[in-house]
Amino acid sequence: MSSIYKYLIISNLNLIIQFHQNDLTFEGIKKLKQTIVNDSKYNPEYNFIIDLRLADIKMTPNELQRYGDWVQDTLSDAQKSMALLTSNTNQVTNATIYRLNANFTNLNYEVFSTMEAALRHVDINISNMQFIETEISKLKEKE
């Protein structure tokens, strides 16, 4: 299976959803984040939900640190919250290593196992949960 790196900007919710499926690599995730920043609809004040639930993180601790440094440099233009949405212990471990990056100053990263908690973190009303889950489903690769 090929790796999936997709995103969706939902302007009326001030939200960017970053979706990953299958292998998640340093170069792949960096390329996606750069594409997001270059999108004409990108707003540096939007919060992120990064959905890792279907991803297999193929990054070393060093790559997680390097990516975190790069993200801080790239997105440091505004304070924002980012929710890392995970579904297994390997994802939680890697997401926690990433979140502990000491260089994050404007980026409030937290790791969650439920969409409800992720939405609370990025200050989105829970009434939007079904809409967001439906939009994420549209990003998934069809088996």
Image (cartoon, rainbow, N blue to C red):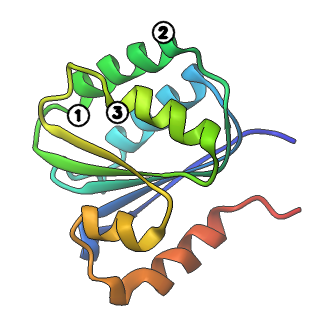
Q: Nearer the viewer, mark 3 or mark 1?
A: 3
Q: Quadrant of residue 90?
A: top right
Residue under circle 1? 75
In the rendered image, which residue does mark 2 sit on? 62
Mark 1: secondary structure: helix
Work out which residue is located at the far front of the displayed protein and give it.
Answer: 89
Look at 59% across and 28% down and name the residue there: 28
- Identify the mark nearer the N-term, 2 or 3: 2
> Which quarter of the rendered picture does the C terminus lie within?
bottom right
Residue 72 locus on image (x, y percent): 24, 26
User: Mark 2 is on which residue type?
Assistant: Asn
Tell me what residue is drawn at x 54 percent, y 76 percent.
133
- Check disc 2: other Cα within 10 Å, few if <14, some if 14-19, many if 20+: few
Left or right: where 5 falls relative to 8: right
Task: Say what amino acid the circle numbered 3 marks.
Answer: Arg
Tell me the residue at 13%/36% (across/down): 106
Is 33 placed left or right of 124 in the picture? right
Neighbour tally class for label 3: few under 14, some 14-19, many 20 plus, Cα within 10 Å: many
Q: Which residue is mark 3?
A: 99
**Disc 1 and disc 2 in contact, CB within 8 angstroms:** no
Q: Secondary structure at mark 3?
A: helix
Using residue 71 as the reference point, say whether residue 94 is left or right of it.
Answer: right
Q: Which residue is at the front of the view, 103 or 135? A: 103
Frontmost of labels 1 and 2 is 2
Q: Residues within 10 Å of mark 1 (few under 14, many from 20)?
A: some
Residue type at tag 1: Leu
Query: Of marks 3 and 1, which one's residue comes earlier in the chain?
Result: 1
Residue at 35% in and 90% down? 127
- 54 horizontally vs 121: left or right: right
Q: CA distance from mark 2 to mark 3?
A: 13 Å
